[in-house]
Image (cartoon, grey):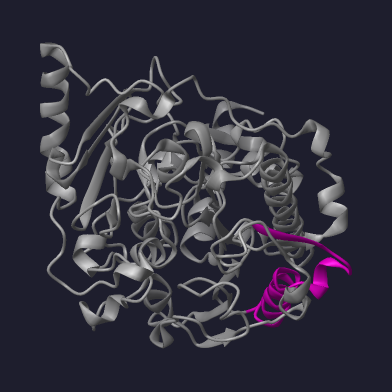
């Protein structure tokens, strides 16, 4: 083959890739409370071959950060492309349309362009498990069709073990190694319904969102997934002695104020086992979705976006669990994008990106016009070249209610750069944190305690961009302290 023949082949390929991208369908996969507990993110315990395969054929963003690590605010932020301070959503009760009634959500933008848009399961907030089978805290203008499956995980709730009986199973470490098959579970039904819709709409343009409920508590999955993680192989995360001594009180969530909830080590190990069992359950459902794209001939014309609403703690920092913190394990979450024809597919990207970047990215990749008011930027350059210059910074925040530790509510905000994480509580009055990720990736040493002059300069330089993207004061708009 001579040079001109090769050049012609390249031109045909580029034209084909462009056509594929601009006419692409969208499969939007959301997972609830999933940390970077995946093989493709370097987790040596996780058994997640299907998500790993997606990462091997798309771009895995190894440092993607949510805007507020709580279900309702982060999902509203992703779907509107705005930060929490703009949509004024900090708790589990406030709907973003109260502040922005006319905002066009991501799926709504596709609906306006003639796409079939549908939701199966949890995309916007749900009270889990109480609202499973309902529309939850949905946004009707976002969808042409919605489906709300309800599986045997709801019928089996009386069988669930609750390690903290004084709490509801939705907020406690609670689990069940269930009888039955995947498709008996709500999440198995979600995959089945999403596949059915892809089959029905395979000759149309579609935006189909599949939102899985696990691994949100209670950790419910068929027993076979528990068997994949023998208890003798489960270990709790390492933390140095007195790890918490240099960390401000507000850094620890009010719903997990004491290490490990006061539970013994074996109970905590069982909780970790149950969490990973749910991760593998979800991996199997993602595999079913990807197999369906292949069998329907849609894989080359469908943009796949895989994301979790936030990270999750499994005992880090000497016994921190669940969400609502600004530590790395919670602020970071999985993000994998497989876009037709992009040169970066099959590679990982270490650039700092934010979840508000998802909305403009999906629009650009599919050739849709941008929407006004978006507060992120398209990741398109990184999808073509994961090593492209980027200079990314990620801002995450969380609102603390008043409790027996805090006399008044406190806003926490944190900025993550390539090297640093800088966090301040009540604009620094309730404490500050600085971690050097080049030397301390587990955030064990808070350098903001008695910092030398050069670190004071580092903190001052990080404070300026942090102030531009997140307010440090408690919001004047309504919020519900019990629902934080």
Q: Is residue 336 above or below residue 452?
A: below
**In the rendered structure, which segment of residues is drawn in magenta?**
174-203
Q: Within the magenta stretch, is there residue 189?
A: yes
Q: Nearer the viewer, residue 221 or 425?
A: 425
Percent of width and height locating residue 457: 11, 20
For residue 185, side relative to residue 307 (left or right): right
Please state if 99 lies on the left or on the right of 128 as rendered: left
Does residue 372 show up? no
Residue 245, percent across and down? 35, 26
* Front position in the image: 362 or 87: 87
At a point 56% along the width and 65% down the height, the residue shown is: 166
In the displayed structure, 353 sits above or below 127; it is above
Find residue 381 and report its horizontal and vertical position in percent.
37, 41
Task: From the viewer's perspective, tell me whether residue 17 is left or right of residue 248.
Answer: right
Residue 249 in sight in this render:
yes
Residue ID at (26%, 68%): 371
Front residue of 317/93: it is: 317
Task: Please state which of residues 346 and 462 is positioned toward the viewer in this rendering.
Answer: 462
- Main SS, magenta region, reads helix
| Quarter of the image where the C terminus is located | bottom left
Seen in the picture, residue 132 relative to 271 is either above or below; the reply is: below
Q: Quadrant of the N terminus?
A: top right
Q: Residue at x 19, y 65 (%)?
A: 86
Residue depicted at x 38% and y 53%: 254
Point out residue 326 in the picture as x, y percentages from the top left corner. 35, 43
**Numbered marks: total:** 0
Task: Say if the magenta span includes residue 358.
Answer: no
């Amino acid at each position: 083959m001579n040079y001109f023949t090769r050049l012609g082949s390249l031109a045909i390929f580029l034209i084909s890739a462009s056509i594929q991208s601009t006419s692409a369908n969208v499969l939007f996969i959301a997972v609830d409370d999933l940390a970077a507990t995946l093989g493709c993110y370097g987790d040596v315990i996780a058994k997640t071959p299907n998500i790993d395969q997606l990462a091997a054929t798309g771009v895995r963003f190894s440092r993607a950060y949510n805007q507020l690590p709580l279900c309702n605010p982060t999902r509203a932020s992703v779907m509107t492309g705005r930060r929490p301070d703009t949509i004024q959503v900090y708790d589990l009760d406030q709907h973003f349309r109260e502040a922005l009634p006319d905002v066009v959500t991501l799926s709504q933008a596709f609906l306006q362009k003639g796409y079939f848009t549908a939701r199966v399961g949890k995309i916007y907030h749900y009270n889990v498990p109480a609202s499973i089978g309902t529309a939850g805290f949905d946004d009707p203008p976002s969808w042409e069709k919605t489906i709300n499956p309800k599986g045997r995980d709801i019928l089996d709730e009386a069988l669930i073990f609750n390690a903290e009986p004084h709490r509801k199973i939705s907020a406690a470490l609670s689990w069940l190694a269930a009888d039955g098959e995947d498709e008996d579970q709500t999440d198995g039904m979600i995959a089945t319904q999403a596949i059915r819709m892809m089959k029905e709409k395979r000759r149309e343009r579609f935006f189909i969102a599949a939102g899985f409920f696990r691994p949100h508590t209670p950790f419910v999955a068929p027993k076979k997934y528990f068997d994949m993680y023998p208890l003798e192989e489960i270990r709790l995360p390492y933390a140095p002695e007195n790890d918490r001594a240099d960390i401000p009180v507000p850094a620890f969530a009010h719903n997990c104020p004491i290490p490990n909830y006061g539970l013994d080590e074996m109970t905590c190990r069982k909780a970790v086992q149950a969490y990973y069992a749910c991760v593998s359950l979800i991996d199997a459902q993602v595999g079913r979705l990807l197999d369906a794209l292949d069998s329907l001939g849609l894989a080359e014309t469908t943009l796949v976006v895989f994301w979790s609403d936030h990270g999750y703690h499994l005992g880090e920092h000497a016994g921190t669990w669940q969400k609502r913190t600004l530590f790395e394990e919670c602020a970071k979450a999985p993000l994998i994008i497989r876009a037709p024809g992009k040169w970066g597919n099959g590679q990982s990207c270490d650039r700092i990106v934010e979840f508000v970047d998802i909305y403009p990215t999906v629009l650009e990749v599919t050739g849709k016009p941008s929407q006004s008011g978006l507060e992120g930027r398209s990741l398109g350059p990184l999808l073509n070249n994961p090593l492209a210059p980027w200079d990314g910074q990620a801002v995450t925040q969380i609102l603390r209610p008043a409790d027996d530790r805090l006399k008044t509510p406190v806003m926490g905000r944190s900025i993550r750069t390539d090297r640093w994480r800088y966090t301040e509580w009540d604009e620094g009055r309730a404490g500050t944190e600085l971690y050097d990720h080049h030397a301390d990736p587990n955030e064990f040493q808070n350098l903001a305690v008695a910092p030398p002059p050069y670190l004071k300069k580092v903190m001052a330089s990080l404070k300026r961009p942090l102030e531009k993207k997140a307010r440090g004061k408690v919001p004047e708009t309504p919020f519900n302290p019990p629902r934080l």
